[in-house]
Image: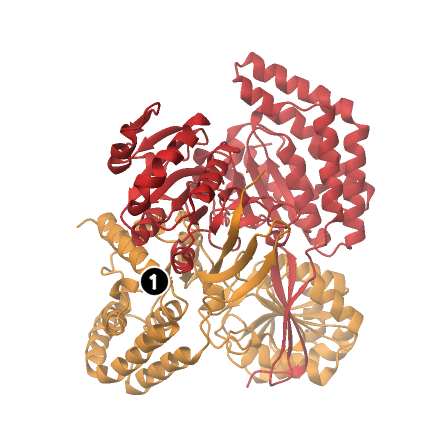
Chain colours: A orange, B red
Amino acid sequence: MSHTALIETLGRQAREASLVLATAETSRKNAALTRLAELLTERVDVILVANERDIAAATAAGLAKPMVERLTLNKKRIAALAESVRQVAALPDPVGQELERTTRPNGLDIRKVSVPIGVVAIIYESRPNVTIECAVLCLKSGNACILRGGKEAFETNTVLAALCSEALAASGLPAHAVQFVPTADRAALLPLLKLDPYIHCIIPRGGEALIRFVAENATIPVIKHFKGVCTIYVDRDADAALAEKIVLNAKTQRPGVCNAAENLFIHQDAAAKLLPKLAHALAEKNVELRADPAALKLLQKEKDLKVVAAGGEDFSTEYLDLIMAVKVVPNLDAAIADINRYGSGHSDAIVTRDEKAAQKFLAGVDSATVYWNASTRFTDGFEFGLGAEIGISTDRLHARGPMGLRELCTYKYIIRGNGQIRE
Amino acid sequence: MSHTALIETLGRQAREASLVLATAETSRKNAALTRLAELLTERVDVILVANERDIAAATAAGLAKPMVERLTLNKKRIAALAESVRQVAALPDPVGQELERTTRPNGLDIRKVSVPIGVVAIIYESRPNVTIECAVLCLKSGNACILRGGKEAFETNTVLAALCSEALAASGLPAHAVQFVPTADRAALLPLLKLDPYIHCIIPRGGEALIRFVAENATIPVIKHFKGVCTIYVDRDADAALAEKIVLNAKTQRPGVCNAAENLFIHQDAAAKLLPKLAHALAEKNVELRADPAALKLLQKEKDLKVVAAGGEDFSTEYLDLIMAVKVVPNLDAAIADINRYGSGHSDAIVTRDEKAAQKFLAGVDSATVYWNASTRFTDGFEFGLGAEIGISTDRLHARGPMGLRELCTYKYIIRGNGQIRE
């Protein structure tokens, strides 16, 4: 079968499954989830055999060690995965919620009700847990999904997706509601991106190159989960201890994630007093500082502090590492303008005691999530209380910021009349 | 200037304007709208001169008469346009609404607040009113817009957009918040579709070919306003008079619009009794019927009734004309399946007295708007009470069905803390 024909078959099967799943009872979906959690435990050996094949192939191909580590499952990780499936089963069903209701003067009763999107394709890299996490969130929200994982985890993903199908079938739901693309060939990606009769939404999760490729080639709506170039702005009137605590947390608590801070902006009136102290604290945590001329001038005088000059790209780079770009700004307006220019619209914070300045920052910074006196690290579905997260959208349409079960739904208008016609 | 450079300039200007407009006070936006309504009246002669140039060019180029008619403005139409602008000024501001608020156990105060999308590009054909309608809805919702109209109305659109800019400037808002692409050259369209750093959403309004071109080439999220292949399903237990009233209204009250019905499905147990009567009523209104074999068999016996056999494409065609495809279905499930297969997910209705059947239909038909005992013609922003409408989305993400001011907004999370960090 050609890739195009194969993908079209997956799409048609997914669409058919989605129509059944869309009206499935909550108890049935939860039964499938519970069964999946059991299967992950019962079949742990089968999963590990497949995972070992992936690891052996990756190692033979010379994949970097951290990548092989990301690929690796073990009994503990699989048990944690099973537990996360049970947690999703325990969450409320996002489908069938009445979002609004109006009765029009002509008597028409208009209800706006949440329904699944339909068929969601998720394109991701390496970590095989993503297969289960995405399948489970789609299932709970009544969406059929087509999963396309990285070639490194192909064997593991295939087994995990098969367990999802088995759990669905065991609960009387269509097995095709979860399908994994059964080839690692890159050529299968393009037809998937163009299958608009059957797929309603594509969520790419991965590096910038992958996301760009998807956005450029898809004819289907895409919700991008792009990079996080997050900034902490320390205002003129910031509390020094609070600023240090927040900057350190946002930069160093887990530098490899999208809600970690990459930039530190500081008001010029506060810079002389606060910046050296902040810089030393960051240096102690092994953070490399890249400073603009004004910051460099201030920090070069400091003993035991290594600072380099920031280059042209530094303030718009997602380091995902212990590196921070530092800049002295003349005022709040300049800080807001620079964040809107250099940032990625993900998460940005102001540290200040000045409520008026904070209000201006919160309104003026055009990002999905804006913070006053808190770390950017809280941009996360669990921290927001969504109970789950399929990712963090850097797009503005449909979902912005953390995407939970509710964001995997759309709505329909259900209208009851008694013979109304339009005059 | 090359088309790419020109479009990039428009985009950068729009983005800058959008950041100002996003936090503009309601009173200022309304002042701009009120001034625009005045300008439309004050400058009616300038508008009509430009419109006459468009009409002359279109007539010389041999444009069909109905198209020239759609292009034509006159004092009465312009006065109505000014009135519609005043109506939008009177609507509530959709920006800054608190959609949700939670306080997390760690004390973080998370507010989800409506904000403008940012920069919206609207690509449309012929009618110059659309320029004002779209500009006004974008302005009210705090979005900057880039408008790309059809070449036939180029002169008129240019004047109308200039009036929008004048009204904005007169109210202290950035003139670039409304920009019309200053060339009718087709080559300017492609760079517009790929300007993702500056444009956040594209809304194409027009024929299928235009919408497909936009969806295939845009790297920016698109909200499609596609065709309406709407079906009325007359159930076994339908009231005959109600069925006739609804079918006639949905098909004939205004056949050229997307929420008019194109298909009539009827339960086999009701067909013998109801279909001939319905067919005669439709024929009296000059509706041409295209019937599947079972319907044809029933209707061929009728005197004074011309019915043709339906072809392969008939049940998925948007006629926008006095034509209706008719089909006898074995049961409710078949009706639902056929609507999901042939329809465009726009608006579909069931006529029945059976509440259980209605519930099944309303849940199972995967369309933006589903009706029980009412005409599909109500799918419309004004009829829904939205106060305005930029179109009817046939997409599922972000907006589904009628799109009003609220659907021109996204949201952001505004979070207040007192030093929270992630452990």
Q: Is residue A309 left or right of residue A270?
A: left
Disc 1 designates what residue?
A145
User: Is residue A145 shown to the viewer in this render?
Assistant: yes
> Residue A193: image x %, image y %?
36, 51
Of the pair B372 and B48, the residue shown nearer to us: B372
Question: Which residue is painted at 56% across and 40% down in the image?
Answer: A422
Front-lying residue, B297 or A410: B297
Pick the residue in front: B404 or B111: B404
Sort mark 1 into few (<14), some (14-19) or many (20+) by Cα contacts within 10 Å: many
Q: Secondary structure at mark 1?
A: strand
Placement of B262 over or under A35, stated as above or below: above
Q: Quadrant of the C terminus of chain A?
A: top right
Q: Position of residue A125 (x, y in %)?
A: 35, 66
From this view, report whether residue B297 is shown above or below residue B387.
above
Q: Nearer the viewer, residue A324 or B306?
A: B306
Q: Image point 54% across, 42% down: which residue?
A: A421
Q: Amino acid at mark 1?
A: Cys
Instruction: Looking at this view, name the residue that lies furthest to the top.
Output: B60
Q: How many marks?
A: 1
B136 vs A29, left or right, is right
**Residue B38, image x and y in percent?**
81, 35
The residue that appears at 23% across and 61% down in the rendered structure is A182
Residue B243: x and y in percent read: 44, 43
In the rendered structure, the answer to whether residue B266 lies left or right of residue B105 reads left
Q: Is residue B226 visible?
A: no
